[in-house]
Image: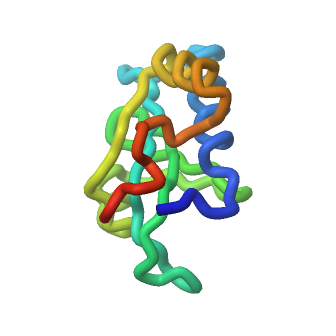
Amino acid sequence: MRTGNGDCFPAALNLLLEFHALRQLTSSEPVLVHGIVTGQGKIDGVQHWHAWVEIGDTVIDRSNGKDIKLPKGLYYSIGKIDQTWRYTPDEAWSEATDNDHYGPWIDNWEEMAC
């Protein structure tokens, strides 16, 4: 399993910290999510790691110059997402600084079988 060549991990962490620092919150705290998604288009059917932010039932994905805001159920359905790891802003900051990278932060991420 690989993370690919995109910028989703730094884009998602930076967005999470931006929402947290500016207190641009709704009734829900933002959460950083790392997950395994199934690709579309040129990478149709290929499973890979991805990262995004959720606030309540809304997914915000600003990777690779996009600005996607979708209901969580639709986003998960499109990406065929069933494995996720969630981090509060404090947990994400701690993981990023402890591991010296943007993620994923689970020990066996390279060996994950999907």
Total residue callouts: 0
Residue 28 location in percent, x, y? 37, 23
Say which of 55 and 79 sits in front: 79
User: Which of 76/95 is in front?
Assistant: 95
Q: Is residue 67 left or right of residue 80?
A: right
Q: Is 63 rendered above or below residue 90?
A: below
From what the image shows, is residue 45 above or below residue 23?
A: below
Question: In which quarter of the view is residue 11 placed?
Answer: top right
In this figure, which colouring scheme has been used for the structure? rainbow
Residue 22: % across, % down: 64, 16
At horizontal 70% and vertical 58% (from top left) the residue drawn is 64
Instruction: Tell which of 6 and 62 is nearer to you.
Output: 6
- The picture places residue 93, in percent across and down from the top left corner, at 57, 19
Judge left or right: residue 91 versus residue 101. Answer: left
Question: Residue 84 in the image: x percent, y percent?
Answer: 33, 45
Please report the residue visible at 73 percent of the width from the left and 57 percent of the height from the top. Answer: 65
Residue 58 shown left or right of residue 83 in the figure = right
Is residue 13 shown above or below 90? below
In the picture, the quarter occupied by the C terminus is: bottom left
Left or right: 35 as drawn, with respect to 92: left
| Residue at screen point 37% across, 69% down | 78
Q: In front here: 111 or 82?
A: 111
